[in-house]
Image: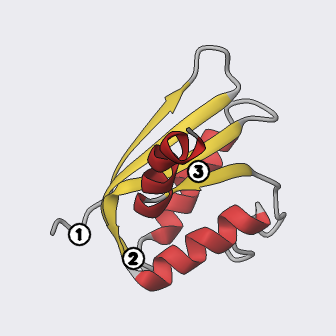
Amino acid sequence: MNEKLRVLVRMDLDGAKAHVKVQGHVTVQNLNGLYGVVQRAGSLASGLSLELDVTRAQTDSDAMGELRAFAKSHHSPVHVDPRQRDYQISLLTKNTAVSAALSPVLAA
C-alpha cells in the first residue's frame, strides 16, 4: 500500500460545497497534512460545506477515530487550529457509502 496521500479538492459551481477526496494510507502521522488541506478548502468561501471522502483510502483505526471526532465536533484538533474554527464537515467512509446506497432500497 502506498504510504503517500493523494488528495483532490473539487468545488461545486455554486460555491456551496467542496469535496475532498482522499486516496492512499491515512495514518495518525499524516493527519496534520490532511487537516491542512481541509482548512485551505474551508477557506475558499464562507459557510462552505465540506465533504471529506475517505472511501478509497486505507484508514488506520486511530486515524478514523480522529476523523470521526472532527466530523462530529466540527472542529479540528487544537494543535492544528488553535482558533477552533467551525467547519461544516461530513465524513464519507466505506460504511456510510454502503448504508447510503442501501437507503433507497430499504425505503422502498
Quarter of the figure that contains the N terminus: bottom left
Task: Kindly identify the amino acid type of the residue bearing the numbered disc 2.
Answer: Thr
- For label 3, count other residues whose C-alpha is less than 10 Å away and answer few (under 14), some (14-19) or many (20+): many
Say whether disc 2 or disc 3 marks the residue closer to the N-terminus: 2
Q: Which residue is mark 3?
A: 38
Say whether disc 2 or disc 1 marks the residue closer to the N-terminus: 1
Circle 3 SS class: helix
Q: CA distance from mark 2 to mark 1?
A: 9 Å
Circle 2 SS class: loop
Q: Which mark is residue 27?
A: 2
Task: Kindly identify the amino acid type of the residue bearing the numbered disc 3.
Answer: Val
Q: Which residue is mark 1?
A: 3
- Of 69 and 2, nearer the camera is 69
Task: Kindly identify the amino acid type of the residue bearing the numbered disc 1.
Answer: Glu
Residues at marks 2 and 1 touching, judged by CB atoms closer than 8 Å: yes
Q: Residue at x 53, y 50 (%)?
A: 52
Q: CA distance from mark 2 to mark 3?
A: 16 Å
- For label 1, count other residues whose C-alpha is less than 10 Å away and answer few (under 14), some (14-19) or many (20+): few
The percent position of residue 103, horizontal first and vertical second, equals 54, 46
Residue 70 seen from this side: yes
The percent position of residue 101, horizontal first and vertical second, equals 45, 45
- Would you identify the image quadrant in which residue 46 lies? top right
- Would you identify the image quadrant in which residue 43 lies? top right
Quarter of the figure that contains the C terminus: top right
**Residue with the most extreme bottom position:** 62
- Would you identify the image quadrant in which residue 91 lies? bottom right
- Of 96 and 18, nearer the camera is 96
Relative to 40, does residue 10 appear above or below in the rendering? above
The percent position of residue 19, horizontal first and vertical second, equals 53, 38
